[in-house]
Image (spheres, rainbow, N blue to C red):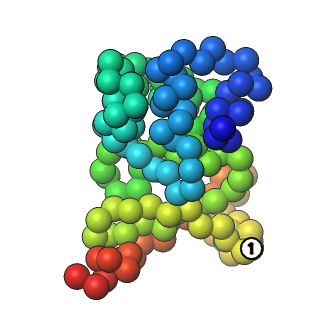
Amino acid sequence: MSDLLERLRARGWRLTAQRRVIAEVLAGEHVHYTADEVHALAAGRLPEISRASVYNTLGELVALGEVREVTTDGRAKRYDPNVAESHQHLVCSGCGAIRDVRLSGDPLAVLPEEERYGFTVSEVAVTYYGRCPDCAAA
């Protein structure tokens, strides 16, 4: 069973067949699917699932804090179920592939106090861009 399914069960979230298959699609490492990709993969497992069910369920999962919306380059929103640990993203500027990366230090520590302009920083988002091995080889 996926970590997301376990978290949803622990919350007592009602797992209909549609919700379960969406949670199963979102299982795994480096998952950053668009809603359309989630729908296509879910329909492969449950052909009668509607696009509206996918969009509604993704919206509920985001509202619950169980999935994070990720937008890295003006493309479609992607959905990241890795909310349990702090991480940043590495994005291929060629194909758009996204990988989770964990920084070895505190990203806030590199922002000098004088560059904070009195802000109380509550969140840091760092995105790295480059070319994946496949795109670099092409």
| Vertical comparison of 30 with 55: above or below | below
Which quadrant of the figure has residue 5?
top right
In the rendered view, does 97 fall on the left or right side of 124? left
Which quadrant of the figure has residue 12?
top right
Q: In this orientation, which residue lies closer to the viewer: 93 or 41?
A: 41
Task: From the top left corner, tell me how far across and down residue 128 is, in percent.
Answer: 48, 71
Residue lying farthest left? 138
Residue matched to label 1:
105
Q: In this orientation, which residue lies closer to the viewer: 6 or 84?
A: 6
| Vertical comparison of 78 with 6: above or below | below
- Residue at the image point whose x is 62% and y is 48% from the top: 82
- Residue at the image point whose x is 28% and y is 85% from the top: 137
- Residue at the image point whose x is 42% and y is 66% from the top: 91
Task: Specify the quadrant that holds the C terminus.
Answer: bottom left
- Residue at the image point whose x is 32% and y is 69% from the top: 93
| Vertical comparison of 135 with 118: above or below | below
Q: In this orientation, which residue lies closer to the viewer: 86 or 53?
A: 53
- Kindly tell me whether residue 126 is visible in this rendering: yes
Within 10 Å of disc 1 (Cα), the crowding (few <14, some 14-19, many 20+) is: few
- Kindly tell me whether residue 68 is visible in this rendering: no
Task: From the top left corner, tell me how far across and down residue 57 is, in percent.
Answer: 48, 23
